[in-house]
Image (cartoon, rainbow, N blue to C red):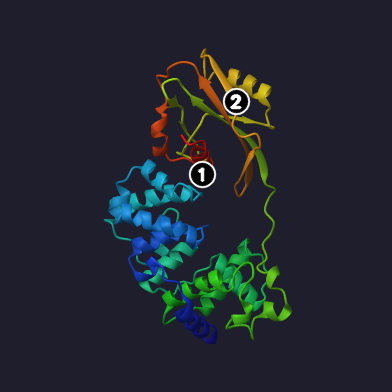
Amino acid sequence: MIFSKILNHWYSKNKRDLPWRETKNPYHIWLSEIILQQTQVKQGLPYYTTFIKEFPTVFDLAKAEEGQVLKLWQGLGYYSRARNLHATAKYIVADLNGKFPNNYNALLKLKGVGDYTASAIASICYNEEAAVVDGNVYRVLSRYFGINTPINTSKGFKEFKQLAQELIDTQNPSEHNQAIMEFGATQCKPQNPLCNSCPFQTSCVALEKKIINELPVKNKLNKVSKKFFNFIVILSKNDKTVLEKRKGKGIWENLYQFPLIESKKELNYEEFYTELQKSNLLKNATFECFLYNHDEIIHKLSHQHLYTKFWIVNIDEMMLDGIYVKDIHNYPVPVLISNFINDFNF
C-alpha cells in the first residue's frame, strides 16, 4: 500500500538511533516497551540503560528483590508496571525456562502485557503481522483519515485497530510498526506537528480541513479528586527517622513513605498538632514541629491531585526503631517523597 511505502521511506531517513532498535532480543524489546508505556523516550532511555546494565538477562531480573526493582524504577511513575515487570520475569524463568512467548496470543497472557505491547514484541522480534495501536498511532491515523471516533472507547479501539491492521506492511511488519510510532512521536506531534515537511501533506484530511488540533478525539474522564496529605518527617536525637511501607493495592504499593495523616482539607498548625497527638505516633515523646513547605505541593496523578505538606517533627530523645537518616536513599519511594528528600538534603 502507498501509505506504508511513504511511511517506511520517511522512517529510513528520520528514525532516531535508539538502543532497542539494534536488537531483536525479546527481553530487551519487552523491557523497553514496558518502560515506554506512558513515558516519553527522553525520560525512559536512561531507565532502560540502567535496567539492562543492572539486569542483563531476564534471569537477573527474576532473582532481584522487588525493592531493588522499585528503587531503579523510582521517578517513572505508574509503579504497577515495575511490579508486573518483576512478576513476569519470575514467571518466564520459572515456568517458561527463560524463553519468551514467540507470538501475539501467547505474549498477551503475560502480566502487564496488553494488546499494544504484545503487538510490538510479536512484530519486532518475530515479524508477526500484528499492528500496534498506541497514542502516536491514534494521532497519525485520526488526523490522516479525519476520524473523530473517541480513542478512549471500545468502539474507538476496535476501529483504529482494524484500520492499523489493514495498513500494515505484510512484508515487513516490524519496520512498519516502528515507523508509524516514530512518525507520531517526531513528525505528527501532539503540539505543533511538522505539517510543512510532512510526506502526507497532500492527502491528510485533518490538514486539508484545518482540524489538526481537534484530533484525536478523547472523551472527558471522570472529575479528578482532591486529597490532602500531611507527611510527618520525624528526626530523632540519634539521627533516625521513620519510613513506612505502603500496603494494599494502591499506586504506591510496596513503596516507602513518611508516616501520613490524610485530612479532608488543608490543616493549619493547630489542627495538625491535634491530629498528630491523636495518632499516638510519638507516644509520650517530647517534640517540637514546624511546617517545611508553607505552600502546598500539588502532586498531580491521572485520577487525583495530592495537596501535600511536610511537617518536620524533632523529638528530644533517642529512637530505638526507625532507620538511620544516612540510609534513607536506599529505600524505593514515590517521586513526591524523593523530591522532598533531595530538597531537604538529608
Q: Is residue 65 left or right of residue 179?
A: left
The answer to whether one can see residue 121 in this image is yes
Say above or below: 103 vs 231: below
- In the image, what residue occupies the spot 68% across and 27% down? 268
Tell me the kind of residue under disc 1. Val
Upstream in the sequence, badge 1 or badge 2?
A: 2
Relative to the observer, which residue lies in front, 333 or 147?
A: 333
Can residue 109 be seen here? The reply is no
> Could you tell me residue 150's position as x and y percent?
66, 65
Task: Give the residue number, with chain letter if any, for mark 2.
Answer: 290
Name which residue type carries label 2: Phe
Element carrying mark 1: helix
Residue occupying the point 57% across, 65% down: 135
Instruction: Name above or below for residue 135 compared with residue 321.
Output: below
Q: Quadrant of residue 128?
A: bottom left
Is residue 208 found left or right of 239 in the rendered image?
right
Q: Which mark is residue 335?
A: 1
Left or right: where does residue 51 sit relative to residue 219? left
Circle 1 crowding by C-alpha within 10 Å: few under 14, some 14–19, many from 20:
some
Q: Position of residue 132 (x, y in %)?
A: 50, 69
Circle number at residue 300: none
What is the C-alpha distance between the residues marked 1 and 2? 22 Å
Q: Mark 1, mark 2: which one is toward the viewer?
A: 2
Q: Of residues 211 and 118, which is closer to you in this image?
A: 211
Circles 1, 2 touching at the beta carbon (< 8 Å)? no
